[in-house]
Image: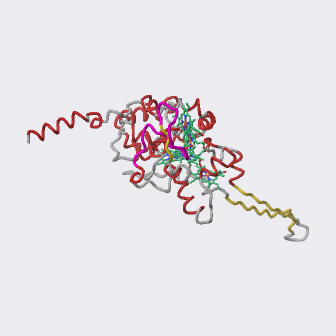
Amino acid sequence: MKRLRLFLILLFISFPLVASGAEKAKTVDELAKMYDVSSCKRCHKKQFAEWEKSIHAKSLIGTGRTLGGFKGFITGGLMGAFTKSGVKDVKDIKMDHFAMCFKCHLPQALTSGTDELARQLAKAFVDADRETLGKLNINCNVCHTTKALIHKWQDGEPEKNVTYGPALEGDHDDKMTPKMKKSVVMKESVFCGQCHGTGPNLEFPQPSQCGTIYGSYLHAYIPAGGTKTCQDCHMKGGDKGHLMPAYRDPDMRKWGMNVEVETLGYKFLPKAGDLVPTAVVTVKMTNKAGHRIPDG
Ligand code: HEC
Ligand code: HEC
Ligand code: HEC
Ligand code: HEC
Ligand code: HEC
């Protein structure tokens, strides 16, 4: 019995870091540092320049509406309508309260952030503090490491020091990610589907519904004979690469919709001497995107 106790104590001493979760970020700056991508810029100039301009690079702010949506979620939801959330004030907020949003808007906060970080972010949303919120986003390491493996029972958890790409295996000349491995999902739509949603997120105590385009892609576009992936249209079509644009890009607007207009003008004569100029306008709009538009 004594020996067993000694063994258990020794076991605890050997793994204290795992037990206390010491690797998690307590502040925005700590999480930003853990996911720092400044080193990538030197060698991947094109990808970096495109990504920097993308909406993924400001996934807590968006066009401004995302920031506002989060603020409303905290003040009107957690502190308002969700009376059983346990939140009366920012200081009651835990990371779990954000899971129904950060699943897609900031997945690294859920795997690598503490409740203290959740409270700092909550305050930044309420104060509309763009400078703080702009430090965290969906960056190279979120896509090429954290979200790069999906089938964990087959492929295991993604390794922190590996960058997973669409093709290459071997050494990678980067300090943070000295190895490259191939991710089998990187060129597939399901990779984007991890955050672009199939419908309501029912796994949370308070379900959320936001991006649902992957659902529409699977259930409408593919059954109608669609053959393209998200990457084909959003990255390769027109060489948009890591900008991954949508309707704010004029080319995407053009490709997304076919509009045919036919008109016939004539004069209508309801009674003698009372000519009414009339027109028949037939508009045919066809959605050529790989899913419903608009979404979200
Ligand atoms: C880690 C989650 C995540 C992954 C993976 C992801 N996205 Fe996104 N994406 C988002 C979020 C969140 C937004 C919305 C950001 C906002 O508006 O605040 C977004 C926005 C977009 C937009 C809108 C762009 C705009 O300018 O309006 C497009 C298009 C898009 N993503 C395409 C893709 C494609 C294609 C893939 C796969 C190659 C992908 N995304 C993978 C989370 C993700
Ligand atoms: C399943 C993934 C997912 C979840 C969960 C999610 N979002 Fe989103 N969100 C997205 C994507 C993807 C977009 C943008 C693309 C689109 O509209 O399809 C988006 C767009 C938005 C927008 C609109 C931005 C604009 O410019 O119109 C707001 C606001 C927003 N999200 C806030 C939230 C909040 C707050 C939560 C939690 C209550 C949340 N989201 C949960 C994926 C998600
Ligand atoms: C939203 C997810 C996402 C983000 C963020 C992202 N990537 Fe990618 N990246 C992809 C996908 C998907 C592919 C594969 C495209 C294909 O071949 O179908 C890819 C491909 C690549 C490739 C292979 C060559 C190419 O351009 O296709 C490189 C290199 C790369 N990314 C580097 C980066 C760097 C550096 C960053 C940050 C500046 C970054 N990526 C950010 C999803 C992402
Ligand atoms: C010192 C230069 C250097 C730095 C720094 C660097 N890379 Fe690379 N990376 C490369 C080279 C070289 C390749 C191979 C490209 C090729 O052969 O086409 C590569 C390939 C890749 C690929 C593509 C693998 C594939 O399957 O096509 C990805 C993804 C990638 N790097 C991501 C990153 C990310 C993310 C960072 C920052 C954390 C980064 N790289 C930093 C030089 C670098
Ligand atoms: C056949 C080409 C095609 C495919 C496949 C495709 N898209 Fe799109 N997508 C478009 C076009 C074109 C637009 C812009 C349409 C418009 O004008 O609103 C768009 C718009 C979007 C938007 C913005 C929608 C909004 O209203 O906020 C998002 C997000 C997006 N796509 C993500 C994806 C994801 C994720 C996939 C894969 C599951 C995908 N797309 C597959 C062509 C495609």
Q: From which residue to which does the magenta span run? A: 156-178
* Residue found at x 50% / y 40%: 170
Task: Reply yes or no: does residue 158 show up in magenta.
Answer: yes
| Whole-percent x, y for residue 1 in the image | 8, 42
* Furthest-front residue in this view: 170
* Count of marks overlaid on the render: 0
Task: Describe residue 161's horizontal placement relative to residue 40 as left or right.
Answer: left
Residue in the foreground of this view, choosing between 276 and 235: 235
* Ligand number 1: quarter of image: top right
The single residue placed furthest to the bottom in the displayed view is 271
Identify which residue is drawn at 79% across, 62% down. Answer: 281
Residue 7: x, y in percent?
16, 38
| Residue 85 in view | yes
Question: Is residue 30 in the magenta section?
Answer: no
When asked about the image quadrant of residue 146, the answer is top left
x and y, in percent, of residue 129 in the image: 50, 30
Name the foreground residue: 176 vs 48.
Answer: 176
Q: Residue at x 31, y 36 (%)?
A: 21
Q: Quadrant of residue 270?
A: bottom right
Residue 75 makes an appearance in the image: no
Q: Which color mode does the image show?
A: secondary structure
Horizontal side of 31 relative to 212 (left or right) equals: left
**139 over 100 or under it: above or below:** above
Residue 70: image location, x then y, percent? 48, 41
Q: Is residue 114 above or below residue 229?
A: above
Task: Give the quarter of the image for residue 213.
Answer: bottom right
